[in-house]
Amino acid sequence: MPKNNRKKIDRNLTSIGFVATIALIIIGFLAWWAYSFISTNVYNELASQKIYFPAANSPALNNPEIKPYLEKYAGQQLLTGPEAKAYANHFIAVHLSEVAGGKTYSQVSAESLANPTNPTLKAQAQTLFQGETLRGLLLGDAYAFATIATIAKIAAVVCFVAGGIMFILVVLGFWHYSTLK
């Protein structure tokens, strides 16, 4: 291959590498911003709810469906996505399963509508509705968005590392280009 063609290929590839480096760094900063923004909002929203895990020696933690999952958070305020998932799945869900013999809100609501004068069914439907709503918000808003934030953080780190590697390759490419005559 003639040297002029080689020099042109080196220049073009190094220039493309330079653009890729800039793109990776920009994407990394955007992903880090997304991580920071989402994490801060999840934290602030959960903090404003003032939800606390039961205290360490609380009878609420004695249930074998609850204790292994929530004992490590005993007495703490719920502030993160993983904590929201644990609370929703191993505290709220366990208590909801005890409300109407394990029936869902949909089942109890249908029974309550069929028997509008039954105050027990009405109260169970209301409790299940409120509990499932809180559970859904903790899982759908807090845990899901916290997971998205974690993915954004991983993407940011990957972009920064790839950008750093590309930067080194670009420097070497420009050096190689300058040595060709």
Image (tube, helix red, strand yellow):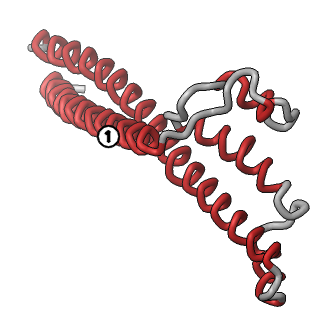
Is residue 5 visible in the rendered structure shown here? no
Residue drawn at point x = 77 percent, y = 87 percent: 113
Q: Is residue 85 above or below residue 176?
A: below
The quadrant in which the C terminus is found is top left
Q: Amino acid at mark 1?
A: Phe
Q: Report the residue that reaches farthest toward the right.
A: 101
- Which image quadrant is residue 8 in? top left
The quadrant in which the N terminus is found is top left
Badge 1 marks a residue whose secondary structure is helix
Residue drawn at point x = 75 percent, y = 76 percent: 122
Q: Is residue 51 above or below residue 125?
A: above
Is residue 148 visible in the rendered structure shown here? yes
Residue drawn at point x = 42 percent, y = 37 percent: 43
Name the spot of residue 55 as percent of width and height, x first. 67, 26
Name the spot of residue 69 as percent of width and height, x first. 75, 31
Name the spot of residue 4 as percent of width and height, x first. 12, 27
- Which image quadrant is residue 14 in? top left
Relative side of 137 to 59, left or right: left
- Which image quadrant is residue 177 in? top left
Total residue callouts: 1
In this view, the residue in front, 110 or 84, is 110
Q: Residues within 10 Å of mark 1 (few under 14, many from 20)?
A: few
Residue drawn at point x = 72 percent, y = 64 percent: 128
In this view, the residue in front, 177 or 33, is 33
Name the spot of residue 118 as percent of width and height, x first. 82, 82
The residue carrying mark 1 is 37
Relative side of 83 to 159, left or right: right
